[in-house]
Amino acid sequence: MAALLLVACGQTAQGTGQSSASPATARQLTDLGAQVFPYVAQFQFYTTCINFKENGAEPPTGHDYSACPITDALHARLQSTQANFCPCDQNPSTTREIKVTPRPGGGLVIVQLYGGQIKVEMVAVTVGGKLLVNDLPAKGDVENSTSTPIVFDAKPSATPTAPPKPTAPPGTGSRVLNVPWYHQAYVLSCESAALRMALAYQRIATTDRAVLDIIGHDLRGPVFDSSGMHWGNPFATFVGNVNGSEVALTGYGTYYPTIAHAATVLGGRVLRSGQNISPADLYDAILSGHPAVVWVTYHWVKLTRKDYVAFDGKTVPYAGPGEHAVTVVGVQPTKVLINNPSTGVEWIDKRTFEAVYAIYDHMAVILA
């Protein structure tokens, strides 16, 4: 599995006091990582600090985070989503390596589990004299050793409600569709939000939740054996917790068959869906007035494929915790206009777009 190094979201700590500006020591950060992922001597494996339902936590509480050294803000976030730090309840790890980087006010803790196949990043802050975890990014940004940085247009500073007009005079090969922009409602609901935008072009109103209810979900965590990782099948359902983390492998996403099916159920007209839809075919569809949901990567980084075999035997295109879906709503001779459910409306140069569009085998759903 591709190993990713994340960019912290930079949330403000909320606890019993103000965060300190002094860096934590390496020992303090290492001890924090060990507290979040303690060793269970009785069974000789590493697990997570969360107390699960099977260990006595009662609904509606679900997971019990009382043993976790986390801020009030992160506690509330985890409690509301019933997310977890990793799939350790499904398949406990027999290995644990902790790497730390002291920073002003706390530091960064990266815990590697399952022989390095999972890397969980935690942003630590000092609150009221205590070192606590304050943030768990959900998607990977920059691949640790095999990424190819790609230059792309800056993201808009304001939240748009409609795509901007082309910056260059329109001509042959240029068109912008009037597709509204919506922010994804859940941490990992980019595919549902992208479909919601495309359906709005057909004057069909829906929500991320309505799309997800049609798709369904497989909440099982991944397991590992000598052949690698095995997880749910995103061609058949949504894999994991939609409020989980791609990085910690507690949530992932879904692929084109479920999105095409949901579009049809909601009254939309799908012109074409699948893999191997070439960039040229995609651009022609936009020029003909048809928006498309496409599978790319988070922040347009080029990731290395390492596919896995799903529980049902299906081979799944996988490139680590960076899977993302967007809506293509415009095209120019050298650029593509994207309604990105995570970041807003952005022009992406075709070279960048085509490099990441190829990672999931040119996967798309084109709507009328």
Image (cartoon, rainbow, N blue to C red):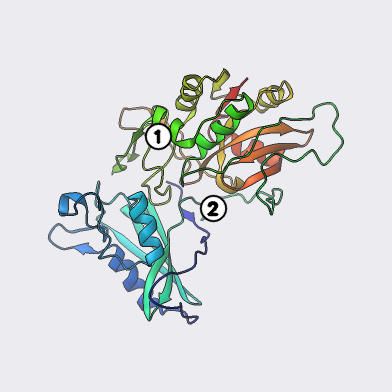
Residue 93 in the image, given as x and y percentages of width and height: 26, 54
The answer to whether residue 254 of the structure is visible from this angle is: no
SS state under label 2: loop
Residue 238 as seen in the image, left or right of residue 280: left
- Answer with the quarter of the image where residue 57 lies: bottom left
SS state under label 1: strand
| Residue linked to disc 2 | 141
Q: Residue at x 45, y 26 (%)?
A: 258
Tell which circle, 1 or 2, labels the residue nearer the N-terminal end.
2
For disc 2, the neighbor class at 10 Å (few under 14, some 14 to 19, many from 20) is many
Up-down: is 94 above or below 334?
below
**Res. 70 mark:** none
Residue 363 in the image, given as x and y percentages of width and height: 55, 29
Q: Residue at x 61, y 25 (%)?
A: 203
Q: Residue at x 47, y 40 (%)?
A: 189
Q: Amino acid at mark 1?
A: Phe
Q: CA distance from mark 1 to mark 2?
A: 22 Å
Residue 56 in the image, given as x and y percentages of width and height: 15, 54
Image quarter where the C terminus lies is top right
| Residue linked to disc 1 | 238
